[in-house]
């Protein structure tokens, strides 16, 4: 038995809006699986080595539930156009570069390292349409200690000359890719880019593959008003965008839909009834002027919501920053709603950035016994304050401001994968 014991000020999010705090506590894992959080070390662990982080915070690591690996080379650039023009002008040409496997290897190694260094240990990620680069991405994430889902993107229309497959290629390359996925911590997820990228025939065949191979699915939904209008032209038989996924069997509790900025009451009810997870991407929605998603309303209605960085519509790789953007966006939405939809608190946004996403990977909320150990050790000893701050206040500050090398250590699936 391999026992890990880390000591510090332990904070976790067991439910929306609640933080569990154990000052100078012990987080214990055996063979990478959490056994518990304790105020005093239980008898059976006495004598085992303890990694003592003193006054530092020990918090859950992040689940980034929506991001695009092949957009990493364009992070922080080209955010001056709305979605469809942005895709055609900047995004598709950037993704096309991943036909080059060497470039993919070098880029994805850097991305994986940056994710881990920022405490993101679980992802739900889009690759590009390239099968080989997708396998390279999965290899590099696995090596770096990132866990979760990666999808080879499917797109057989509207990608332009350099970023399009035929329907047949798309299906065959997806099947070949699925045969090649033998990773311990990185699993495949079917990824029709969005409705305008996939013909009906492709959607039909992907839906069948999802059923036959019991695979989860990720895509985009109701991000931008122009996009929604386009989908309704492409699918006049569907009264709403989501129906163009549902009709192909892509609408269930193993589906992640990014954005949902403009999902109205009926679409939100469909999200809730099916148990679809909304990946809310506040940074991206602001950058691409997509809008402010009604997150408070979704939560009140019982829709499942977690957070995504959506790089490179989003410009923030650190989910601390994405969490801050999420709160800011909820404040904008609150003002726009005449103060009728209360903005998200820090502990609520923290829950969305951690426990809400990890549930998609089968975890229970917080540092629950039985969960794989995913944690960040966080330093803030160089930040100045006038009073002694509580752990919750320190977490709030970390969301908005961090000293250099604030992320001291990161644990993923039971292993220490990063030390500053
Ligand atoms: N919709 C379809 N593709 C994309 C993408 O790459 N990024 C975002 N934000 N939305 C999309
Ligand atoms: Fe996206």
Image: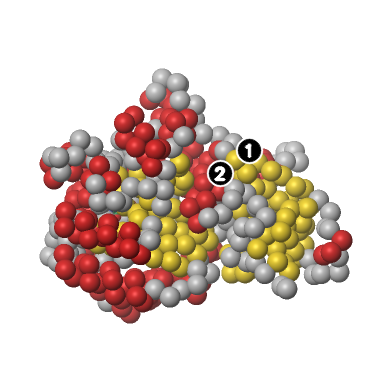
Q: Is mark 1 within 8 Å of ligand 2?
A: no
Closer to the camera in the image, 182 or 135 = 182
Quadrant in the picture for the N terminus: bottom right
User: Which residue is drawn at the image coordinates 37% and 39% (left, top)?
Assistant: 271
Circle 2 residue = 351
Dot 2: few (<14), some (14–19), or many (≥20) neighbours within 10 Å?
Answer: many
User: Which residue is drawn at the image coordinates 63% and 44% (left, top)?
Assistant: 14
Using the rendered view, name the quadrant where residue 339 is placed: top left
| SS type, badge 1 | strand
Circle 1 residue = 18
Are the two marked residues, 2 and 1, in contact with CB atoms closer than 8 angstroms?
yes
Residue 306 visible in the snapshot = yes
Q: CA distance from mark 2 to mark 1?
A: 8 Å
Task: Report x, y in % for residue 96.
Answer: 23, 67
Q: Is residue 401 left or right of residue 135?
A: right
Task: Report x, y in % for residue 24.
Answer: 79, 52
Q: Is residue 240 above or below residue 73?
A: above
In the displayed orientation, state which residue is furthest to the front.
Answer: 212
Dot 1: few (<14), some (14–19), or many (≥20) neighbours within 10 Å?
Answer: some
Counting residues from the start of the chain, the first of labels 2 and 1 encountered is 1
């Amino acid at each position: 038995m391999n026992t890990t014991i880390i000591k510090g000020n332990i904070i976790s999010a067991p439910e929306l809006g609640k933080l569990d705090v154990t000052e100078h506590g012990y987080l214990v894992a055996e063979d990478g699986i959490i056994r518990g959080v304790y105020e005093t070390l239980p008898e059976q662990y006495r004598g085992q080595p303890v990694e003592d982080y003193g006054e530092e915070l020990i918090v859950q690591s992040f689940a980034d539930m929506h991001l695009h690996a092949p957009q990493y080379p364009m992070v922080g650039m080209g955010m001056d156009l709305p979605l469809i023009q942005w895709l055609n002008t900047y995004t598709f040409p950037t993704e096309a570069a991943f036909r080059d496997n060497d470039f993919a290897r070098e880029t994805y190694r850097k991305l994986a390292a940056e994710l881990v260094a920022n405490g993101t240990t679980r992802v739900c990620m889009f690759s590009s349409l390239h099968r080989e680069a997708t396998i390279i991405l999965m290899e590099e994430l696995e090596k770096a200690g990132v866990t979760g889902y990666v999808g080879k993107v499917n797109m057989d229309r509207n990608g332009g000359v350099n970023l399009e497959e035929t329907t047949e290629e798309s299906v065959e390359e997806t099947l070949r890719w699925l045969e090649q996925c033998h990773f311990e911590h990185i699993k495949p997820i079917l990824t029709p880019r969005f409705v305008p990228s996939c013909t009906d025939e492709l959607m039909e065949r992907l839906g069948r593959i999802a059923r036959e191979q019991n695979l989860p699915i990720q895509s985009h939904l109701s991000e931008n008003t122009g996009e929604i209008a386009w989908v309704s032209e492409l699918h006049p038989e569907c009264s709403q965008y989501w129906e163009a996924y549902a009709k192909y069997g892509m609408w269930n509790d193993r589906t992640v839909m990014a954005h949902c900025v403009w999902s109205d009451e009926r679409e939100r009810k469909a999200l809730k009834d099916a148990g679809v997870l909304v990946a809310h991407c506040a940074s991206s929605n602001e950058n691409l002027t997509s809008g402010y998603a009604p997150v408070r309303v979704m939560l009140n209605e019982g829709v499942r919501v977690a957070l995504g960085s959506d790089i490179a519509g989003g410009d923030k790789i650190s989910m601390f920053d994405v969490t801050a953007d999420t709160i800011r966006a909820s404040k904008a939405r609150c003002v726009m709603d005449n103060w009728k939809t209360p903005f998200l608190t820090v502990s609520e946004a923290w829950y969305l950035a951690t426990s809400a996403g990890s549930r998609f990977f089968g975890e229970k909320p917080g540092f629950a016994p039985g969960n794989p150990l995913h944690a960040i050790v966080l330093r803030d000893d160089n930040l100045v304050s006038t009073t002694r701050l509580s752990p919750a206040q320190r977490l709030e500050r970390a969301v908005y401001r961090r000293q250099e090398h604030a992320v001291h250590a990161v644990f993923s699936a039971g292993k220490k994968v990063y030390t500053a």
